[in-house]
Amino acid sequence: MMTSSEIKRIATYVEKGGVGKTTSAAHIAVAAHNRGHEVLLVDLAGTQNDLATHFGLSIVDEEATDDGVSIDAPISAVFGDDWAFLRDNIDDLLDRMTFPTDEGPDLIPADPGLGGADNNLANVPLEERYQKLDGFVEDLVADKYDLVIFDLPGKEDNIALNGLFAARNVVAPLKPGAFERDQLQKLDATLEEISADLDVDLGLALIIPTIISSQETLSESFVEYVTEEYPEIVGEPVTKTADIGNNQNAGRTLFAVPDDELYATGKRAREAYSANTEQLLSRLTDR
Ligand SMILES: Nc1ncnc2c1ncn2[C@@H]1O[C@H](COP(=O)(O)OP(=O)(O)O)[C@@H](O)[C@H]1O
Ligand SMILES: [Mg+2]
């Protein structure tokens, strides 16, 4: 059995939507699996269940059918008052929370209870409020997996703070745009503030310039800016490609697509995610 200290943890987080957090979480998860890791992906990003869709899993509210799987033990329970009881009394709790994907990583989908869980956490004493997810990793996840990836909401709510506290290492995808430079500086400041508040050592482990087009000057200058500001942790830019969205809709990452079905841009994006995952994993080992 692995000890908890061996599990690597990361969170995809930027206080903004549409920058590639979910896409990056999915692709890094599969790339890490392909490098031999036991990977658990956790969707904390809300009720749209983006990660489930990304892996072709359809979540249905009622009983499981041929059309979809239903959530038996939701991730939101980790944040609730009954958690300790559930954890101590249900033997196969983690198995009941996770779903296998076709591409290797296991997935805990988002569930509708996350919104309420965020509100309820506001009433939990400060010294316990942000530690719930960390406890879940220590108690259940670390025995079975060696990498856990949290896909976080694009806002600093109590769920995101739990994710940051549990993960320590932040992966920040960011796409070119007028305000994205501010976004990076804001993220730096936010992580410093949260580190002080929660008394934990949070750090940016990887910045991924995403949705990068070689034809757009904004893209080029954005990559240059990030590379100059964060030379140690900038990843390989991920090319803008229609292959990403098309395959998300088909329920798979670029890693599950045969070469002859990808554009050149899709192959480049896939290579970038491979290289970024390798860089990230070696950095986490060193930390
Ligand atoms: N490299 C890329 N090229 C083109 N579109 C992309 C790329 N990466 C992500 N997208 C698209 O951008 C949108 C936002 O990505 P997503 O990962 O859902 O962002 P977030 O989780 O930060 O909200 C999605 O429609 C996704 O398909
Ligand atoms: Mg998302």
Image: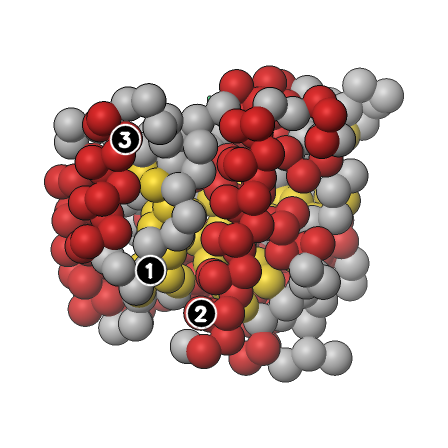
Query: Residue 220, percent across and down?
Result: 26, 34
The residue under label 3 is 219
Query: Residue 145, percent across and down?
Result: 67, 64
Task: Provide the secondary structure element on which disc 3 rests.
Answer: helix
Q: Is mark 1 within 8 Å of ligand 1?
A: no
Between 66 and 171, the one nearer to me in the picture: 171
Rendering quarter of residue 191: bottom left
The residue under label 2 is 283
Q: Residue at x 33, y 60 (%)?
A: 233
- Sooner in the amino-acid sequence: mark 3 or mark 1: 3
The amino acid type found where label 3 is placed reads: Ser
The amino acid type found where label 2 is placed reads: Arg
Q: Indicate left or right for 44 with 180 as reference.
A: right
The residue under label 1 is 233
Q: Is 259 located above or below residue 143 in the figure?
A: above
Q: Is mark 3 within 8 Å of ligand 1?
A: no
Q: Residue at x 57, y 27 (%)?
A: 264
Query: Residue 131, percent across and down?
Result: 40, 64
Q: Residue at x 27, y 41 (%)?
A: 223
The answer, for residue 28, to whether it is visible in the render is no
Between 149 and 280, the one nearer to me in the picture: 280
Task: Provide the secondary structure element on which disc 1 rests.
Answer: loop
Q: Kindly check if marks 2 and 3 are in contact, taking CB atoms under 8 A apart as contact.
A: no
- Sooner in the amino-acid sequence: mark 2 or mark 3: 3
Query: Residue 275, percent across and down?
Result: 52, 53
Q: From the image, state whether disc 3 or disc 1 is nearer to you.
A: 3
> Which quadrant of the rendered structure holds the C terminus?
bottom left
Between 96 and 236, the one nearer to me in the picture: 236
Rendering quarter of residue 155: top left
> Which quadrant of the rendered structure holds the N terminus?
bottom right
Rendering quarter of residue 255: top right
Q: Is 139 located above or below residue 58 in the figure?
A: below
